[in-house]
Image (cartoon, rainbow, N blue to C red):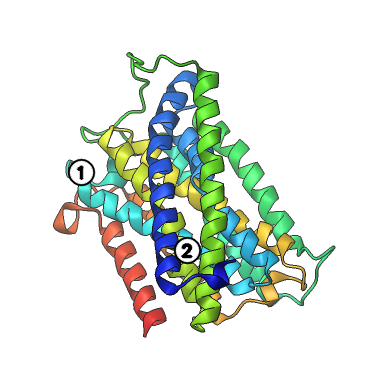
Amino acid sequence: MFSDFSFAALAAILAGTAIVILLSGLRMTSLADRLADRTGLGEAMVGAVLLGAATSISGTIVSVTAALDERASLAFSNGIGGIAVQTAFLALADILHRKANLEHAAAELANVFQGTVLMLMLALPFVAYTLPEFAIWGVHPVSVLLVAVYAVGLLAVREVRETPMWRPVRTHETREDEPEEDDPEPRSTLALFTVFAALMLIMAAAGWTLSRAAAELTDRYALNASVVGALVTAVITSLPELVTTLAAIRRGALQMAVGGIIGGNTFDVLFITLSDAGYRNGSIYHAIGRDDLFWLTAGLTMTAILVLGMLYRQRRGPAGIGLESVLILAVYGFAIAVQAF
């Protein structure tokens, strides 16, 4: 079907899916904040699990669809490229939060712990790549291990939040996670979850459409699938993270802003597991190329800088933002330059 469309039509489809994903993500932010207060789970937990997974649904569909079409590079780089751009979004959000370095003001042990889990998960695909090609029913054991690490990590994050063994030092700039006393939302919690689920379905449909359009552009113009995945589909499907992060900061939900990015990135690593299951020509880890591993390296480096920034908690850095934000943007800019030229 998409092969009959002109370039202008395909470009319009990309723009249309971006708008749908953007608006859906914006609405999800306010719903997630209300649900965090009503369920008592807290902004960091809801941001990492509910909001992080929900805003990643369009990217999930893109990777799975690409894998089913035997486009290993597009499937892999879409998820990993999303991790890089979403981490860069957090650095951009730091620029907008002028009171203090965002990583300082949003001090939360759950986010630090989740960040280290993310680094572990990003390291595992390297292990799979260096091992001999092996798969059980078409799925590499590392893909299963990624799911296990993610599940254990979620349980551990909740335990860390409820019974922390250490707490960040509270300063004048630190923003506490406190439920809002007035809840202007008249609908029940079940109704909020229902609306949230409906938005996820809309984003899933947008993700499928985006995957088909991107695949057609890649084939028609002989584009590098890794670049298309990391810099086109990954950026478009990551727009909810940008919107939700900026909206959360505007609402004062700083811990949700940071937790949403880290949680979304952690969930995005599972794109690899789903892509491996969808890719039927063996292990996807041995069907990818150096360009895909390059984006995996960039994402891991940017995540390490972010976690170090959350631990160091610099109050103010260059241009009024944290040094880690400057470094994250520098790494991402360098990665784009290397891939583009």
Q: Is residue 264 above or below residue 165?
A: below
Helix or strand or loop: what does disc 1 sit on? loop
Residue picked out by circle 2:
233
Left or right of 47 in this view: 75: right
Furthest-right residue in this view: 137
Quadrant where the image shows the C terminus: bottom left
Residue picked out by circle 1:
100
The front one of 180 and 161 is 180
Q: Is residue 117 visible?
A: no
Quadrant where the image shows the N terminus: bottom right
Would you identify the image quadrant in which residue 286 lies? bottom right
Q: Are marks 1 and 2 in contact (CB under 8 Å)?
A: no
Left or right of 272 in this view: 113: left
Task: Tell me the crowding category of disc 2: few under 14, some 14 to 19, or many 20 or more residues within 10 angstroms, Cα based.
Answer: many
Residue at x 47% of width, y 63% of height: 233
The front one of 79 and 121 is 79
x, y percentage for residue 7?
A: 43, 73
